[in-house]
């Protein structure tokens, strides 16, 4: 099965998709390519249009403009039944009156695959999701995680060109969710399945994806590798949506030395990353500073920036400590500091000097 | 309520006393049994109830102050259930014209009080009944579209059966009563030799007409409605159902020849409450002037022979007991039907099924 | 209640015993809650039925039953009645399923309008409804007039006063009984199931056959049972629309009660009708129980 799927999986390309519902714009000029065997996640808040995009790809919605190609074939006007796309629904959509075996056999039966072959392929698919022995159970006799696996087996058993996953882990508890995320990812890589994954959970997106496409208000904001999305967001919106962030406003000052400098609104001067085009002095910018890149200045002699401040709030999170600090001009910063044995702990009211590298302060917007 | 209960307990005594008083001296109000708040009369409803109210009940309400409440429909089974259970909701009820004999035989009716109701001038058939009060007569007749048969309609049951001379869809009642008589008359049996009915001969004659009957009617308003809608061009029906339409110049006509007369029949259920007042009300329905009023409204002749004189000439030809019309018709034999009704119904149903 | 107090006051009972007690208490509570309904049903439903049965065997005789089966008459009427009820049920199912499906899947506005139209016959008197059919189907009715005027036919068609008219009139009355249970069954189905099936290559027909039909089977059986059973008892509509040519058992029973006061015989006819109806009901339920796996049991 694994050997076959490499041949069947194809790339997905979506070009210039527009979709309106009455006065509401759901998708505006969305173009996206997913390479064969790639795992791409559409990440966005609810109402961002990600589900509409999924429905357009699956064929449940017809776009007003634009086209959808799967494996090089234009499927824009095809019925979902003819697109050969496997899909796992948010609530699994398992047929409640059919056993696990019959559920998984369904797409094969629809394709008139011979009975004997159906039996072996269903067994293979169930083995892949480690559900051998559950053939004769009904969906309601399974746990949430098991139902999820059945849905997955059913979506891949017919060797689809493309696999769509619509927030499939939403109903699972945290532990199960994390193990399922890894399992699905492993399976996807093993079978080389081109996969389009929909989620609003940024952590999930970071864990699973080859690439992430961040969506908002019907537009694609940024498409890139997880690391790029996290570390080099191209807009405050992406920065804000992916991970925790401090976004600081300031004005560019004449650069002395290697790193350009930005005067924050409170008067503090910081050095920022020099990659990309640095705006001319006087430009008003916004700077992203991830909380986990702020540290105790005393522990990091290499940090170009050292800013004194006061701890306003201190939260114990087990893995790390989270601090709310106030620096000059009343500006608040979030900082996460590791909970290693040597790390110093601060209490509310303590004075602190935080340090960070210029490379970790990125200009994400010029106004 | 307590007053009513007292009434029931001493009903007989009071009735006796009331009759005694009626003989000995003119009763004063104080000596009459207490007045109930209302008298419930169960009847056929519709236009008939409206006419009865105008002709009789309104005056009764005015004179006694007792309200007359009318309900419908006529239901012999319900009557028996009421009498059997002793829970009688009706003070007076109408019954089917063919049930007068049976209701007496089964003991479901109180005898009429001759001291309150004067029937001395009623037609003999109506006088003869001890328990059934009959203020009017009606007849099952042939009705037809006069605009379809412009050269004259059917003049007899034989004509009704003659589908060549009078072509077109027909309707008969889905019931053996009247139809057996009609079939025998159509087959040439003289009117005075009809009873006991030769049932085999009647059904054989009915076989002939069956294919031409497009509707076997169930409810009284169906025949007139179907004639008006031209669903059929010939039908049997109760004469009063066509009366108003004919007076209103609808293209309908009826033929009295071979008409089958029945008596409108009213009874006081056995054991009903406030019988004195029920009898009083029936007495009002015996009044010839009021009967004439009712007859001219509904087309059902009054049974009091004195009512004749109050009928206006334009209405006379349309009433069943007008001497000229009466001579052409026969009276239904209730006794025969009481004895044979159920057997006839089974045979009728079987006959109908055999034709499907 | 005293049991419960004792349990609470004493040392903690073994878990299973506590559970058993709680279950028993819950069962008692459920019984007390349903008691008024049961008494109500008992008085208004079971009692008259018993009386009916008593009437049919009054005097310890079975002669009334013997008469029901004595000659072909009543058995033929029973057969005709079942035939018509079957036609009506079939037609109501064929018409009702798409309507219920539409109601369950359309927008709220259309649903409201659709429901109002479906329920209309409920709010109209039998006679008005029946006369409406007469106006539509009559020799000079709307349909014939239209077909004659446009030259489709030369002589009026006979539609009224036929079995066809009876079935049509009855289907009209019975449709809500079919649509409501079907609607409630369909509306409970997750629309993603149909999407999933479509995505897996199922045609619309297959989606209906393999997904909707089995999942709404309970609703189908509920609707079919309701319509079939209620149809057995019709007598006004068939009498008026059938032109007297259609005889159903309820018409005969009514005649026996009202006209001939033959209550024992009417009782026997009713008991036979009830027995056959219950048998049909039982068979249908057994069939469903076999087709649809029980909620908690194993798949096979």
Image: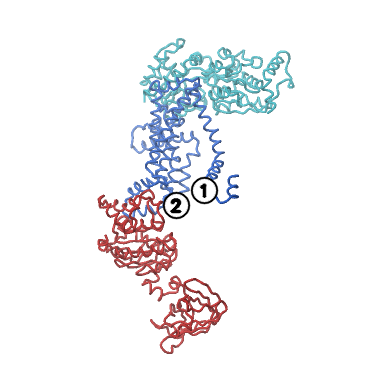
Chain colours: A red, B cyan, C blue
Name the residue at the bottom extreme. Answer: A256
Q: Which mark is residue C107?
A: 2
Q: Is residue C43 above or below residue A312?
A: above
Reading the chain from its start, which is encountered first: label 1 or label 2? 1
Against C246, residue C201 (above or below) is below
Residue A147: quadrant of the picture: bottom left
Residues beneath discs 1 and 2 located on the same chain: yes
Q: Is residue B316 left or right of residue A81?
A: right
* Disc 2, SS: loop
The alpha-carbon separation of the residues under discs 1 and 2 comes to 46 Å
- For label 2, the crowd category at 10 Å Cα-Cα, with few meaning under 14, some 14 to 19 and many 20 or more, is few
State the SS at label 1: helix
Q: Give me the residue at 31% from left, 57% from top.
A: A127
Residue named by callout 1: C19
> Could you tell me which quadrant the N terminus of chain C lies in?
top right
Q: Residue at x 61, y 13 (%)?
A: B121
x and y percent of residue A119 in the render? Answer: 28, 52
Point out the residue furthest to the front here.
Answer: C11
Q: Is residue B134 left or right of residue A366?
A: right
Q: Position of residue C237 (x, y in %)?
A: 45, 32
* Marked residue chain, label 1: C
Give the tally of numbered discs.
Answer: 2
Instruction: Locate the C terminus of chain C and report the quarter of the image it occupies.
Output: top left
């Amino acid at each position: 099965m694994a050997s076959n799927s490499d041949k069947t999986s194809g790339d997905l390309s979506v070009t210039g998709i527009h979709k309106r519902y009455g006065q509401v714009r759901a998708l505006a000029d969305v173009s996206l390519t997913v390479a064969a065997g790639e795992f791409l996640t559409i990440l966005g808040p609810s109402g961002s249009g990600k589900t509409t995009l999924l429905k357009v790809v699956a064929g449940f919605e017809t776009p007003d403009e634009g086209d959808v190609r799967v494996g090089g074939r234009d499927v824009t006007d095809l019925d979902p039944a003819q697109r050969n796309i496997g899909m796992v629904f948010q609530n699994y959509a398992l047929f409640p009156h059919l056993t696990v075996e019959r559920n998984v056999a369904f797409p094969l039966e629809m394709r008139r695959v011979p009975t004997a072959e159906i039996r072996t392929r269903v067994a293979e698919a169930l083995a892949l999701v480690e559900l051998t022995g559950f053939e004769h159970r009904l969906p309601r006799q399974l746990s949430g995680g098991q139902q999820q696996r059945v849905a997955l087996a059913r979506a891949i058993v017919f060797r689809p060109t493309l696999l769509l996953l619509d927030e499939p882990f939403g109903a699972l508890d945290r532990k199960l969710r994390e193990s399922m995320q890894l399992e699905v990812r492993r399976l996807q890589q093993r079978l080389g399945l081109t996969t389009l994954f929909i989620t609003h959970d940024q952590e999930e997106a970071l864990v699973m994806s080859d690439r992430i496409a961040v969506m908002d208000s019907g537009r694609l904001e940024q498409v890139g590798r997880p690391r790029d999305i996290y570390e080099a967001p191209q807009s405050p919106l992406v920065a804000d949506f992916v991970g925790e962030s401090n976004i600081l406003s300031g004005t560019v000052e004449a650069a002395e030395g290697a790193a350009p400098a930005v005067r924050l609104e409170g008067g503090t001067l910081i050095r920022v990353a020099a990659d990309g085009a640095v705006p001319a002095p006087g430009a008003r910018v916004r700077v992203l500073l991830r909380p986990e890149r702020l540290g105790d200045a005393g522990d990091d002699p290499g940090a170009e920036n050292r800013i004194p401040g006061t701890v306003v709030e201190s939260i114990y999170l087990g893995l790390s400590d989270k601090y709310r600090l106030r620096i000059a001009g009343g500006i608040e910063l979030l900082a996460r500091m590791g909970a290693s044995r040597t790390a110093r702990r601060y209490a509310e009211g303590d004075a602190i000097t935080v340090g960070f590298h210029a490379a970790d302060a990125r200009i994400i917007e010029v106004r | 309520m307590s007053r009513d209960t007292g009434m029931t307990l001493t009903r007989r005594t009071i009735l006796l006393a009331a009759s005694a008083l009626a003989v000995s001296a003119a009763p004063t109000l104080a000596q009459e049994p207490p007045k109930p708040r209302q008298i419930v009369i169960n009847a056929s409803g519709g236009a008939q109830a409206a006419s009865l109210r105008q002709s009789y009940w309104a005056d009764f309400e005015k004179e006694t102050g007792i309200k007359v409440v009318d309900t419908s429909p006529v239901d012999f089974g319900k009557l028996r259930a009421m009498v059997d259970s002793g829970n009688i909701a009706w003070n007076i009820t109408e019954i089917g014209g063919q049930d007068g004999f049976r209701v007496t035989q089964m003991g479901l009716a109180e005898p009429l009080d001759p001291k309150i109701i004067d029937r001395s001038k009623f037609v003999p058939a109506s006088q003869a009944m001890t328990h059934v009060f009959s203020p009017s007569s009606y007849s099952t007749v042939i009705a037809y579209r006069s605009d379809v048969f412009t050269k004259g309609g059917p003049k007899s049951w034989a004509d009704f059966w003659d589908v060549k001379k009078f072509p077109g869809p027909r309707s008969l009642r889905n019931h053996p009563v009247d139809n057996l008589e009609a079939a025998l008359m159509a087959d040439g049996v003289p009117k005075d030799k009809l009873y006991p009915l030769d049932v085999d001969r009647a059904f054989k004659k009915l076989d002939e007409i069956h294919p031409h009957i497009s509707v076997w009617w169930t409810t009284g308003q169906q025949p007139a409605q179907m004639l008006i809608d031209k669903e059929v061009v010939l039908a049997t029906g109760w004469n009063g159902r066509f009366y108003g339409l004919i007076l209103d110049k609808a293209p309908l006509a009826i033929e009295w020849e071979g008409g089958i007369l029945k008596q409108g029949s009213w009874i006081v259920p056995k054991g009903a409450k406030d019988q004195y007042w029920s009898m009083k009300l029936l007495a009002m329905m015996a009044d010839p002037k009021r009967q004439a009023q009712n007859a001219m409204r509904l087309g059902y002749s009054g049974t009091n022979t004195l009512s004749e004189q109050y009928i206006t000439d334009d209405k006379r030809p349309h009433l069943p007991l007008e001497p000229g019309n009466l001579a052409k018709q026969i009276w239904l034999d209730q006794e025969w039907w009481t004895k044979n009704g159920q057997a006839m119904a089974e045979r009728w149903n079987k006959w109908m099924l055999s034709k499907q | 209640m005293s049991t419960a107090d004792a349990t609470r006051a004493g040392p903690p009972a073994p878990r299973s015993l506590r559970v058993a007690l709680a279950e028993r208490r819950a069962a008692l509570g459920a019984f007390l809650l349903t008691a008024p309904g049961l008494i109500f049903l008992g008085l208004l439903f079971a009692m008259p039925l018993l009386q009916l049965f008593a009437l049919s065997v009054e005097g310890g005789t079975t002669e009334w039953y013997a008469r029901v089966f004595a000659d072909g008459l009543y058995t033929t009427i029973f057969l005709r009645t079942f035939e018509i009820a079957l036609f009506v049920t079939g037609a109501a199912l064929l018409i009702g399923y798409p309507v219920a499906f539409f109601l369950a899947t359309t927008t709220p506005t259309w649903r409201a309008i659709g429901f109002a139209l479906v329920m209309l016959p409920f709010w109209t008197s039998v006679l008005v409804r029946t006369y409406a059919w007469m106006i539509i189907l009559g020799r000079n009715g709307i349909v014939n007039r239209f077909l004659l005027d446009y030259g489709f036919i030369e002589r009026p068609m006979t539609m009224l006063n036929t079995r066809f008219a009876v079935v049509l009139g009855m289907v009209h009355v019975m449709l809500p009984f079919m649509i409501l249970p079907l609607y409630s069954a369909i509306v409970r189905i997750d629309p993603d199931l149909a999407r999933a099936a479509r995505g897996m290559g199922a045609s619309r027909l297959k989606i209906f056959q393999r997904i909707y039909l089995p999942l709404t089977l309970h609703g189908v059986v509920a609707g079919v049972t309701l319509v079939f059973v209620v149809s057995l008892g019709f007598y006004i509509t068939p009498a008026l629309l059938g032109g007297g040519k259609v005889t159903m058992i309820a018409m005969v029973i009514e005649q026996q009660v009202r006209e001939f006061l033959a209550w024992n015989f009417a009782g026997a006819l009713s008991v036979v009708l009830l027995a056959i109806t219950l048998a049909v009901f039982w068979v249908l339920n057994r069939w469903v129980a076999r087709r649809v796996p029980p909620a908690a049991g194993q798949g096979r």
